[in-house]
Image (cartoon, helix red, strand yellow):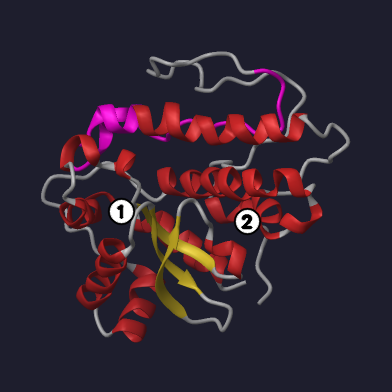
Amino acid sequence: MKRRNLLTGFGTFSLFAFVGLEPNLWSAPGSESAFAQTAPKSLFTLPPLPYAYKALEPHIDRATMQFHHDKHHAAYVSALNTAFAKYPQLEAPKSLEALVTNLDQYPEAIRTTIRNNGGGHINHSMFWQIMSAPKSGELREPTGAIATEIKATFGSFAEFQSLFNLAGTSRFGSGWAWLVRDKAGKLQVTSTANQDSPLITGDYPILGNDLWEHAYYLNYQNRRADYLKSWWNVVNWQEVNKRYQTSLG
């Protein structure tokens, strides 16, 4: 299935602004990051959060967001830059989609690094965008075209939620739960291990939740099921609808 360039799939916020000639900052000027630092010239940069660290409370706490973004996501970006620095002859990929779907074009010595950290970069760049601050009394259910197709595919939003949460709780160890459009053009609930992106197998990620313990452990400890249930309160369905439209090709 032909898809639009993934750069447009993340909306007006440029998640893949990773090619540049000027030094970049880990965090945007004015950010409240306690770990902001100037990065060296690089191919890949960490996108700033589109909201304050505390914006998703009480469902995701400030401390978790701060370390998750400023430490964990930053580490994936740093590892990518380190890998590419070893091969200065390599050209920058046209997009992160191209990076993780063309692994065989890169030296074998860094393919695993690119798969793991490129996947971590692309997954998290999506993750920040498909969440937004909860509003008092607001029922976070899908609207628009994605709501219609979820109902047509799964029977109801509640049934979809149940399947998605099951994919999350049954994923052993670290990974992600996903709503994807598969290669046949159908919506499908799935999960991947570690930081693997569904793009690697030809599926387009519309919605995804991070199942690594660093995404929830400060608040939920070992209660992943509670985290999955609470997470629906911060899903930004407007952004999910944008990704849904991109998935149509």
Kind of residue at badge 1: Val
Q: Gap in Å between the C-alphas at discs 1 and 2?
A: 20 Å
Above or below residue 89? Residue 202 is below
**Residue 47 place in picture, x, y as percent:** 53, 33
Residue at image x 78%, y 31%? 86
The structure residue drawn at horizontal position 43% and vertical position 46%, both measured from the top left corner, is 129
- Callout 1: SS: loop
Q: Position of residue 248 (x, y in %)?
A: 56, 73
Residue nearest the viewer, comparing 196 with 32: 196
The reply to whether residue 47 is visible in this rendering is no
Total labels: the figure holds 2
| Location of the N terminus (image quadrant) | bottom right
Residue in view at x 55 percent, y 31 percent: 46
Where, quadrant-wise, is the C terminus in this rendering? bottom right
Residue that carries the numbered disc 2 in the rendered image: 6
Q: Amino acid at mark 2?
A: Leu
Asked if marks 1 and 2 touch (Cβ < 8 Å), the reply is no
Q: Residues within 10 Å of mark 2 (few under 14, many from 20)?
A: many
SS majority, magenta:
loop
Q: Is residue 20 magenta?
A: no
Residue 41 shows in the view: yes
Picture layout, residue 217 above or below residue 126? above
Disc with the residue nearer the chain's start (1 vs 2) = 2
Which region is colored magenta?
Answer: 40-66
Left or right: where 116 falls relative to 84 = left
Horizontally, residue 196 falls left or right of residue 154, namely right
For the residue pair 59 and 219, the one nearer the viewer reads as 219
Within the magenta stretch, is there residue 59?
Answer: yes
Please name the residue that numbered disc 1 is placed on: 235
